[in-house]
Amino acid sequence: MKLNESSVYSNAAWKEKGFFVPSYDRNKMIEETKANPEWVHFGAGNIFRAFQANLAQRMLESGENTKGITVVEGFDYEIIEKMYRPHDNLSLLVTLKADGSVEKSVIASIAESCILDSANAAEFDRLKEIFAADSLKLATFTITEKGYSLVNAAGETLPAVKEDFANGPEAPKSYIGKVSALLYARFKAGEKKIAMVSTDNCSHNGDKLYAAVHAFAKEWTGNGKADAGFLAYIEDESRVSFPWSMIDKITPRPDESVNEILKKDGVEELEPVVTSMKTYVAPFVNAEESEYLVIEDKFPNGRPALEKVGVIFTDKETVDKVERMKVCTCLNPLHTALAVYGCILGYTKISDEMKDESLVKLIKKIGYTEGLPVVTDPGVIKPQEFIDTVVNVRIPNVFMPDTPQRIATDTSQKLAIRFGETIKAYEASDELDVHDLKYIPMVHAGWLRYLMGVDDEGKEFELSSDPLLEKGRGYVSDIKLGESDIDKIKADVLPLLKDASIFGVDLEEVGLSDLVIGYFAELVAGKGAVRKTLEKYCC
């Protein structure tokens, strides 16, 4: 059993081993899609293969559409060259359900895989051809939040972007420069309509994509590298729209345990590829069953009937509310709490933490007791049901190999939105008292303890990457396990706790800093102090 078109569609063993093999005419789908492309997706990573490509497949299988999806990779071309094309653009999706069952599917909805390389005439010309097609309705993106940034950490324009600004749309080098060049090709072909839909997991993602593309249109029209009307075209949402979206599906790195399942089934050539850019990609992806995609319904050239396969279309305000519900209350704060304490306590799987009574009580207090009273209710998804699924089904799923170390990445960038917004809501409320918050401050104290890089047994551990890691560590560098001088602890960490750019609020100003410092002092009392503190307060 090899993952290629010949094997999948001729070898009965695939179905005998329990794999779902699509029944639609794939060759006809590829022919129709290439002739009249409808949906292009930028970003060929795991989330795309587990989510967007599967949505396209479900539409094909149900007869809601006859066209598939065109995938484009712009960061790491080897993903296409070494994984997609050798497998005839087929992929395996292994859905790991909380009840222990495993669902295995061949994903065959990708009609064409392309490389976003302006230095490769054949590849870039094909993309320009696709973007000139009347039939093209939407381009979706999963390129990470960093993909939309045109500047470095110091706020300076990236060299490739600066060069692209000056040289125009002929052969851009930056990612968004190339995307903007494709939009310029669509503009030149008759100012054709399209929706540019970011489905990256970041706030107001449509605005981030718009701002990046708009910057190129403004520069190019301003310096005469593009026709004057291009800027107006980008600014006219009746022709080019940039809808907001909220996406939620956990798709960890391909796991060895899943690899073993597939090997036992007889699937060959499952070896992952590690590209020269250090991307780890396998012929399969593993993902949880739960998934949410809510999109602002703003599609100038029409769209596929994705609502038939579970996508929720609504207005911008509702998308914003769904995101706030998820990010500020029902999922992300719980993940962050588990991440920082999980690292300190030596856990390597999030699901294992859900067997820890104290940690379960901690996240329930954060979500249900402190978060739900100020939750943003979007109307299209019930917050209580969402958080119930998170706590009872999604996070405890033992078949999902997600780690606290992965989730602890960039914690300094997450605290303001994941906890700061709840603190602000308490401050603004006439009925709630910010001093009633007892468990969110415990996460802040846990993060300070995490920054020490020493676990609860006194052993050093590797901290996850974070742009403010060294800055944060500087505030706790003089604090050792066994420190009992509360005045010293306060003097060391108070300046950090007052940083509203990290916490969303000045924790001293809102009256929570002393509580955080008190918790922290207990957490650093010695070996085992983290466990004792959790058992003391989370009971």
Image (spheres, rainbow, N blue to C red):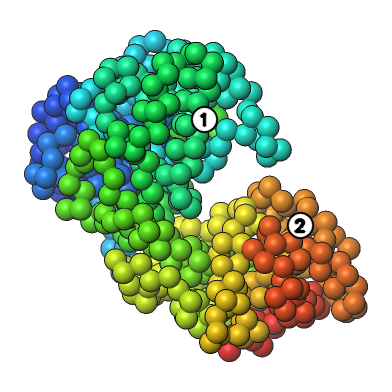
Residue 434 falls in which quadrant of the image?
bottom right
Using the image, tell me which numbered label, if any, was put on residue 215: 1
Task: Look at label 1 and name its amino acid.
Answer: Ala
Q: Which numbered dot is residue 95?
A: none
**Residue in front for this viewpoint, 502 or 272:** 502
- Name the residue rendered at 34%, 38% in the picture: 237
Q: Horizontally, is 536 left or right of 111 in the view? A: right
Q: Please tell me whether mark 2 sits on a helix, a strand or a loop.
A: helix
Of the residues under marks 1 and 2, which one precedes in the sequence? 1
Q: Residue at x 54, y 16 (%)?
A: 223
Q: Distance between the residues labelled 1 and 2?
A: 33 Å
**What residue is shown at x 28% (from left), y 17% (from top)?**
189
Give the residue pinned by disc 2. Answer: 472
Contact flag, marks 1 and 2 (Cβ < 8 Å): no
x then y, percent, for residue 238: 29, 37
Query: Relative to residue 246, is residue 144 depicted above or below?
Result: above
All told, the count of numbered labels is 2
Residue 303, compared with residue 258, is above or below; it is above
- Name the quarter where the N terminus is drawn: top left
Can you see residue 96? no
> Relative to 255, does residue 532 appear above or below in the rendering?
below
Where is residue 291, by image quadrant? bottom left
